[in-house]
Structures are given as C-alpha cells and as structure tokens.
Image: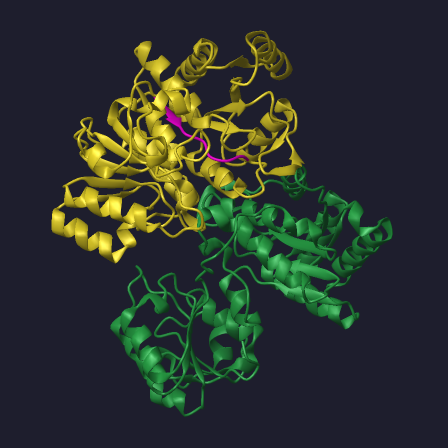
Chain colours: A green, B yellow
C-alpha cells in the first residue's frame, strides 16, 4: 500500500467499537491514512468520541462531504448483514470510482467479482483491492520454509480476536527500536490493510492454508530480516476456525511461539460450551502438535488486560508468568520488554547453535 | 447418485494404478456402475489387467466405441498435468453431453464454471456434477453437532492415502451385516462419487472446514442411523493438509476415532523429512487435541498391510494391538470383526450411560 494513501472509510450507519472492525483496525494502526469516516448517523462528530481512539478524524454524512477532504481511496470498513451489498453502499462505491479513487474492501464477497464494479474500474482506471481474495496459484505446503535462516515467531492464542496481530505489531516496533531487522507477516485482512501485502489465510481453499503460510514466510525471508513475526489466526480450541490455526502453524513452522491470552476470558467467544483450559495446558498442546514437524517452544505470554484495573492486570501478568515459567506482559498497556528479551535470547541461542541445527 | 448410473470413464492415456485415482476408486468401490474405460493407449484390454481388480470391464479407444456399451454418464477419471483440460478431453466431454449424458468430474477446475460446458449442458438438458465443488452457503461450525444422538466415529490416519475411506466402507458393510443402522459420511471426491452425496472438505474455504463437517454429520443424523461413520482426510502430521484434518476433527466432533496406519510406511509421502511417530504417540495426540471440545478416545487400529506377507501382516497387527492396547485388524485383507466389536462395545456403553452424558 502506498504511504500516501488517503482513505475515506465507508461505515454507513455501523461505525461503532464492535460493528466496524475493518474501519476500526485501519484507524487504530494507520490513522495517518484516514481522512474521514462516512456514517450519516454520526455526522459532525469525531472518531475519538466513538472509538476512544483516532483523535480528530472527522465523521461525515455524505460522499461529497468526505470527498472535500481529498481522499484518494475508499475503504469499505464494514460488513453487510447477510452478504449482499446494500444499494446505498454500492452508490458510494460507484461515486468513489467515478472520482478516480481505488476501492479497498475486506468483504467476503469480492468487489473484483462484481461485473458492474469491474467495468467501472476499467472505465475510470482505478483498482479494486479485495483484502480477503487469495492468489490463484497457491501451492500445497512442502516444508520448504525450513530453508529460512531467520528466526520465525508465531503468535497463537486462547481464542479469536484476542490480540495476536496487535502483539506482533508491538513486538515489531520494539525490536526495530533495538535495531533488529524484523519482518511482519500479515495473515488476515487487517494486517494486509495496514502492511499492504499478505494473504488472508482463512479465505484460501482448505488444501492450501499451510501453502499460503509457507509462501508468506518465504516472501518475508527475502527481506533479509533476522526475525520474522507471523500474525496468528484463530485458536487451536476454536470450534469454527481451528483448522486455519493448525494449518498456519504447520505451514509457517515457527521456531518459537508467543501465547496470547486474556485473563478475563474463560470461554470461547460465541461458544460458551468450550471452556478455555489453563495457559500451561494450552502451551503444552501447541508444542505437542508442532513437535512431529519441528520442535518449537512457546517462549512468552502476551496478555490482553484492557478490561482489568492496573493492579489486577499486574497480578494477572505475574500469575501467568509464575504458572507458565515464561516471560509475560501486556505489550500494549505496559511494555514489550519481557517478550523482546525472550525473543532475542531465543534468537541468540539459535544463532550460536548454528542455524542448520534447528 | 442414481443406482442405475452407467459410467463411461475417461482416462485418456493415463489409465494406471497410480495416475487415474478417481477412475480407479470408482471401479474399486462401484464396479457395477462402470460400463467401459476410455483410454486409446490400452484399448482392447480389460480393467483387471491394468489395475489388478475391476474384472472384465472393457477398455475402449474412442467415445463411439464406449457409447456402444450404453453409458448414461461420463466420469472424468483423471487429472490433467498443470490444470488446463486438454482439447482431446474437451471433445469427449462435448460428445458425451451431445449424446444426453451427464458429466461427473473430480477435477479442481470445475466444469460448471466453464461457459462452453454450461451452455452445452443447458442445450442438451444434462447435468454437470463437480465432485469437489462445495456448496455456497456453508456455515462456520458452532458445535451444533453435539445434539446428534448417534455415535459418531471418525477415521484418522498417520498419512494421506492410507485407507481412511476404505476402512469406513468395510466397517459400514460389516455393521450392516449385523443389522446395525449405520450412515457413512463422504468427505472427499471418491466417497462422494461412490455415495452420491457429501462435501469435499479440502475444497471449501478454510473458515468453513469445520462447518462443512458439522453440516455433513447433521445431515447423516437425519437418516436415523445409530452409528455415523465419517470418512477421514489427510493426517494431523501432514505438512500440507493437516489443517483440513484438524478442522474435520473439530467439526465432526467424533465420540470415538479409529486410527489408520500402514506398518511399512515410516515417513510422510513426498515429505520424507516428517517421520511417522509410533501409533501410541499419534493416538495420544489425536485424543489431546479433541479433549478441549469433546473427550474422544481412539478405540481401534485399522492397518493397511497390502504390501506385507500374510505372516508379516499378522505380526504387524499383533504388534499394533499390543503397543496400543486396542483392537487392531486389516479390515480389507482379514476381517473387520475386532473393530466392529470395539465400535459396538463403545456404542453400547455410551447408550447405557445415557446419550446426553457424552
């Protein structure tokens, strides 16, 4: 994604902490790329008031008002109930293209499969970017990723939507501050939107989950990074998405993992029948399923403590560290140092053993 | 699939034990449905000579010769190198449709996405059956399958292509002989071809692997079966396909599993870097990854001993039984009784505990 992108974000009536996930992620991780949010039900307010972050970014009531802020791209930042695009959204998408704007979308239904949009994009010389659309020529994974010299670290988690991408982005920034050459591998639509490359591994044909992950790590390895941070997806105990998580683990073949948890969460979201086991048990499970392909330890715990008091958050981190015997922190709320130290110690040990040994 | 189907099987130049997998599976499991095989390089011979099974089914050199055997459907029984259909195959497919024959295909490239074939099918009033094409409206799995009262048994295996479907078909037949109401759930193209329903779970979008498995088990439960046998796919230690295996396990939520192995196989096919661990270790791994969602034991071992002498096969079965403490047999070569007894004992115990308890 060009650094100079200026998004108008379509969030028609749905701009809110829980309903406009793609819009919110873009604003959280790349606020400098957002010039305005289009939501007539909240026009005149500021993004900060709605999300609690995003500062002074304005919310506008129409495409024309938004266009006054000189966007060069439209981001469809919401998902429709059902699947069909409402006519009001289609007219905004048409307006954007007719004003020469590219359109980015995280929808399951691809804009680039819509004959009308494809024709309009050709007519106006603009590009349709479907964040979830996988490449056509994915391979079946074969373990070629074992040739990568860099240390590959994957985040895994106790549930979906718990901070696996956020943790990696925090770790990336902290490693860069220490002068480490690091690459981040986006595996979901938000990461792709923020980074401008990647594959939404949950959107590929099932046979190619691991192949997609393998390709991404090989691509990241070409950047000469010493450490490759792979964005995790789903959870090994999520009844719906666990196959994606498992394929991502076997395809990316991490040298080590970071376990992401949320102390206040006791059951899988929308699946209350699945109790979340103790962290130490989940850590053992992750190490065991990778073992036949690669010995890969969990080397740290990243906790999402946003809903705890400072004292409770600190206590939860200490408890997790004691229970697992691993470095633990909330890298968003506090700092990433314990995890950075764990990663660098692991990387250093691996390098001194000779890379081929892993 | 109608019982009265009469296939002409297209195997153009590739009819052989290793290259015409779809054709061979159809002939092995439903020979009564095959009237002739089309392969000009082997015209005049009999299927038995090429495959070692299939008896007197003739091999013909042209569509017209094949049509003389009064087929009512064409089965594309081979896959092209690369992906594009050769012109010679296209002309056979056209000829079949123009003679009023339905066309069945296990290709990755769907005939029903090909504008010429779609137009011809409409013109001639015939149907294109793409065995690997998933339904459009698959759900994300939510654990609804826990409402199923029948005992669900999934085959799992040490590798791909090791007998997970074959074992279930043998068990189904043996259970039926004992008067048990049993349903078989096809999860791959061969099973779908033989049974006429099912979903190729490796061909769905990754997010829906478990959802597809869940739907299949719910559908099988509507038949009033007491035991539902789910065809396994891939292997938890296969670097390319393990995500499918894992999603199938979490989506079908078996009450118990049968582990399929091959004593002579020591490493994963085409992935010699992955050594196959001892059966007992793999069994523990399968039980552990299901445990957070459902306590599900492996209750028997099905061995594929086709490449061993009778004495070696018996010895391997005894060894597997001793090492795992479970019933073991080769249900194709010897008999299915040890596994049938294990399944019925498990089912009986589950029923006497009260179904809700599981």
Name the residue at 43% across, 38% down: B251
Name the residue at 32% across, 73% down: A118
Q: Nearer the viewer, residue B226 or B135?
A: B135
Which quadrant of the view contains residue A108? bottom left
Magenta stretch holds residue B283 = no
Q: Is residue B342 left or right of residue B264?
A: left
Q: Is residue A87 left or right of residue A152?
A: left
Residue A220 vs A34, above or below: the answer is above
Q: Nearer the viewer, residue B74 or B132?
A: B74
Tell me how many marks there are.
Answer: 0
- Residue A59 in picture, x, y percent from top left: 42, 83
Q: Nearer the viewer, residue B121 or B176?
A: B121
Q: Is residue B197 left or right of residue B349?
A: left
- Residue A95 in picture, x, y percent from top left: 32, 83
- Residue B77 in picture, x, y percent from top left: 34, 37
Q: Which residues are magenta?
A: B227-235
Q: Nearer the viewer, residue A226 or A202?
A: A226
In this view, which residue lies farthest toward the bottom? A68
Q: Quadrant of the N terminus of chain A?
A: bottom right
In this view, which residue lies farthest toward the right? A352
Magenta stretch holds residue B233 = yes
């Amino acid at each position: 994604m060009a650094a100079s992108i200026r998004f108008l974000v379509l969030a028609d009536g749905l701009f809110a902490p829980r309903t406009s996930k793609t819009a919110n992620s873009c604003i959280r991780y790349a606020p400098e790329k957002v010039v305005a949010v289009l939501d007539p039900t909240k026009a005149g307010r500021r993004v900060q008031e709605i999300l609690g972050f995003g500062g002074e970014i304005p919310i506008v009531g129409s495409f024309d008002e938004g266009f006054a802020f000189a966007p060069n791209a439209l981001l469809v930042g919401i998902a429709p109930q059902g699947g069909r695009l409402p006519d009001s959204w289609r007219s905004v998408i048409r307006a954007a293209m007719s004003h020469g704007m590219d359109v980015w979308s995280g929808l399951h239904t691809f804009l680039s499969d819509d004959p009308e949009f494809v024709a309009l994009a050709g007519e106006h010389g603009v590009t349709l970017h479907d964040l979830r659309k996988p490449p056509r020529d994915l391979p079946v994974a074969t373990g070629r990723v074992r040739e990568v010299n860099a240390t590959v670290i994957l985040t895994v988690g106790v549930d979906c939507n718990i901070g696996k991408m956020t943790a990696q982005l925090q770790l990336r920034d902290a490693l860069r501050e220490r002068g480490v050459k690091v690459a981040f591998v986006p595996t979901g639509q938000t990461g792709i939107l923020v980074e401008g490359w990647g594959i939404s591994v949950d959107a590929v044909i099932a046979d190619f989950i691991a192949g997609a992950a393998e390709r991404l790590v090989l691509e990241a390895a070409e950047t000469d990074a010493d450490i490759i941070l792979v964005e995790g997806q789903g959870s090994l105990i999520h009844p719906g998405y666990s196959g994606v998580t498992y394929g991502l683990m076997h395809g990316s073949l991490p040298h080590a993992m970071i376990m992401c948890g949320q102390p206040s969460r006791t059951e899988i979201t929308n699946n209350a029948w699945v109790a979340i086991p103790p962290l130490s048990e989940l850590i053992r499970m992750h190490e065991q399923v990778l073992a036949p392909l690669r010995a890969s330890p969990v080397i740290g715990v990243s906790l999402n403590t946003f809903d705890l008091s400072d004292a409770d958050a600190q206590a939860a981190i200490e408890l997790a560290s004691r229970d697992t015997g691993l470095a633990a922190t909330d890298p968003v709320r506090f700092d990433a140092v314990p995890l950075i130290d764990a990663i660098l110690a692991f990387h250093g040990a691996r390098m001194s053993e000779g890379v081929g040994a892993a």
